[in-house]
Image: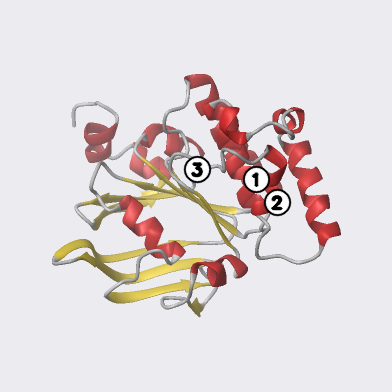
Amino acid sequence: MSAPLLELSGVDVHYGQAKALDQVSIQVRPGEIVSLLGGNASGKSTTMKTILGLVRPRAGRVLVDGTDVTSASTPARVRLGLASVPEARRVFGQLTVHENLLAGAYTRRGRAAIAEDAARMYEYFPRLAERRRQEAGTLSGGEQQMLAVARALMSRPRLICMDEPTMGLSPLFVDKVLDEIARLNAELGIAVLMVEQQAELALSIAHRGYVLATGRIVLAGTAAELLGNPAVQEAYLGKAA
């Protein structure tokens, strides 16, 4: 079994006196899609912010490919291969689609290689190619999500952290976004850590998953194991245990 690409080990996070994460330990291996499930205030977004260096833990470690990045800046983590698709997409609305893509390569050098990658993104997402000169704020929610994914890919990541990628999307675009996540994982081998409330959707494309409740990991297993777990069925799938 390959070594973890990302590892959180015994992580505690506090906001003032309130403990948001309590001894959280998770792993993502190269090429995996891992879902992090949980309801509101379960600690999902705090976990993601800790991984990206936006929140510093009071205890525990964050490692990327074996390197301790617990005290490293967000740009330093991006250079090690992490990228983010934030909640609510957060594209730069007044910039064009193409300018948003270039912003995703902010840690890189080499104009020719960046231009080649932008062209590749238009091949992956033809709808973005049609709108390359359009302001991102005028795109539909699904198109903005595609742009957020493409922007993250511009850093040439090994792992993309996605925070609620299906939030606010129509059912049609939910399926499209999940299909694109699975395709990028299969074709490019990029690992994905996906924070999601909709368990059945997330586990439909994931290899493994973790369930957070009040800041603690309460369940972990393969996607099939979690889908078949009565506690997950009752809490997230609307089925009686």
Residue 65, image quadrant: bottom right
- Residue 215 badge: none
Give the mark, 1 or 3, whose residue is nearer the N terminus.
3
| Relative to 73, residue 99 above or below | above
Give x and y (percent) for residue 125.
Answer: 71, 34
| Mark 3 surroundings within 10 Å by alpha-carbon count, few (fewer than 14), some (14 through 19), many (20 or more) | some
For marks 1 and 3, give the CA distance.
Answer: 10 Å
- Residue 102 badge: 2
Give the mark, 3 or 2, whose residue is nearer the N terminus.
3
| Disc 1 to disc 2: CB gap under 8 Å | yes
Which structural element holds mark 1? helix
| Disc 1 to disc 3: CB gap under 8 Å | no
Q: Residue furthest right?
A: 112
Q: Amino acid at mark 1?
A: Asn
Q: Residue at x 37, y 75 (%)?
A: 61
| Disc 3 to disc 2: CB gap under 8 Å | no
One can see residue 78 in this view: yes
One can see residue 189 in this view: no
Which residue is labeled 1 in the image? 100
Give x and y (percent) for residue 187.
Answer: 70, 46
Q: Amino acid at mark 3?
A: Arg
Split into 4 quadrants, where in the image is the N terminus? bottom right
Which residue is labeled 3 in the image? 90
Closer to the camera in the image, 233 or 228: 233
Give x and y (percent) for residue 169.
Answer: 47, 26
| Relative to 55, residue 235 above or below | above
Q: Amino acid at mark 2?
A: Leu
